[in-house]
Amino acid sequence: MVYTQSEILQKEVYLFERIDSQNREIMKHLKAICFLRPTKENVDYIIQELRRPKYTIYFIYFSNVISKSDVKSLAEADEQEVVAEVQEFYGDYIAVNPHLFSLNILGCCQGRNWDPAQLSRTTQGLTALLLSLKKCPMIRYQLSSEAAKRLAECVKQVITKEYELFEFRRTEVPPLLLILDRCDDAITPLLNQWTYQAMVHELLGINNNRIDLSRVPGISKDLREVVLSAENDEFYANNMYLNFAEIGSNIKNLMEDFQKKKPKEQQKLESIADMKAFVESYPQFKKMSGTVSKHVTVVGELSRLVSERNLLEVSEVEQELACQNDHSSALQNIKRLLQNPKVTEFDAARLVMLYALHYERHSSNSLPGLMMDLRNKGVSEKYRKLVSAVVEYGGKRVRGSDLFSPKDAVAITKQFLKGLKGVENVYTQHQPFLHETLDHLIKGRLKENLYPYLGPSTLRDRPQDIIVFVIGGATYEEALTVYNLNRTTPGVRIVLGGTTVHNTKSFLEEVLASGLHSRSKESSQVTSRSASRR
């Protein structure tokens, strides 16, 4: 996420070790650069290291603020005077895209409240981000979320305590930190995606830029795990936000370009100049060859899964559930797909979850019947229980917003006009609720009674530097929204972060980790009893 191994090698760093590795050799001819989170455990490890140093000299960098008492402990342990410097280098988070960061925390809350350890870790990650961007922001939070208010208070406490670190040059309009809760929009992480980066994460999973392809039928050994990084892969950088249909034609162009540059087998290397030209072009050719085979494999696997799981049809109904308000049509389409043997239990449960969230209080709600259909399809109890757990997590009772029926005249007119002219692409109709929130914020119309400021001060001007943080995880669809807003709104810079970056699978793990599913067991039993009576 920071450097490739070859980039580090170019900096003449030849050995990589973990601080907790037990069997490291003594190498007094080497200098050591230590990059560590300032946890108690890591401080203890570095103290042990300094008492019996294995290297000639140590440069120690902590990824966040370290206490004076810990620095004192390090100084006392450094009897052999091997430490050249100790610095704070604020990098206590994962930079995923230029405008997206993550803390890689799955399961941050217990019920509606923070897990204390994860609250501490999230506060550290968020304050490190602010320090690295040199921002001392005003803070707004989602009023309907106790967790959002708690995190806002913790960040404010750190800013007050470490006020000297946060004394940056004042800007005309102060930066703004907006803290949101995933519970307010449980729809976005449940949808199939059709832009390249989001689709890869949804169907294959992206873990620190790495994609596991080991389950792909007939995969070659060197493609079992591939790296997708916009910094080191030009094709990925140019295509990560494009729709799947465009990716197909761009892959074809990439292949044709590759074919043109491919060294002809019959090409004779007759002179020294020929050989020199070949050797010089070979690394570039080899790199391009790797890029082509990687993306052809990834796109090929995405196509296979789309076809195998009937995802075009499934996604069309998902979009209808997320964006339209036609109950009878939605119900009919879900029932039809539940009868389709190509639709997996995962996708079947996902459709019923979307229905349960949208039509939770509809007068003709048919959830018991759909739960029975899931049972008849052979969907496992784990997924059936998750339907009520998702409603418990992000249902109408919890949401501070109305996800499905716009209240103000502007939004109603927009929806009406959209309905008149139809949609450009039925698979990408949905816009995350974050889009509306940020649009209102940028225009100075975000309601203070729903998103209050922490403390007495408020922004008089429209914000220009905005950091949005989503407790419970952001998504790549929301990252695309932020990318587009940054592109189309001059003078506004938005950075999005979350405790993690979700696909549907990890979001359902988040719901399970919250423990809310155990409370919803009774409701699922009631649901199945009423279904069996029918």
Image (cartoon, grey):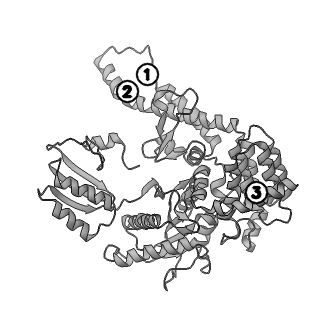
Q: Dot 1 surroundings within 10 Å: few (below 14), some, or many (20 or more)? A: few
Mark 1 vs 2: CB contact within 8 A = yes
User: Against 218, is 441 above or below?
Assistant: below
- Left or right? Give the position of 519 relative to 179: right
- Residue type marked 3: Tyr
Q: Where is residue 184 in the image (x, y as percent from the top left)?
A: 63, 66
Task: Pick the residue in front: 122 or 377.
Answer: 377
The quarter of the displayed image where residue 204 is located: top right
**Residue 313 visible in image:** yes
Instruction: Say which residue label 3 marks.
Output: 355
Distance CA(mark 1)–CA(mark 2): 9 Å
Query: Mark 3 or mark 1, which is nearer to you?
Result: 3
Q: Position of residue 168 (x, y in %)?
A: 34, 74
Q: Where is residue 316 in the image (x, y as percent from the top left)?
A: 74, 48
Instruction: Say which residue label 1 marks.
Output: 263
Residue at 57 percent of width and 32 percent of height: 216
Classify mark 3: helix, strand or loop.
Answer: helix
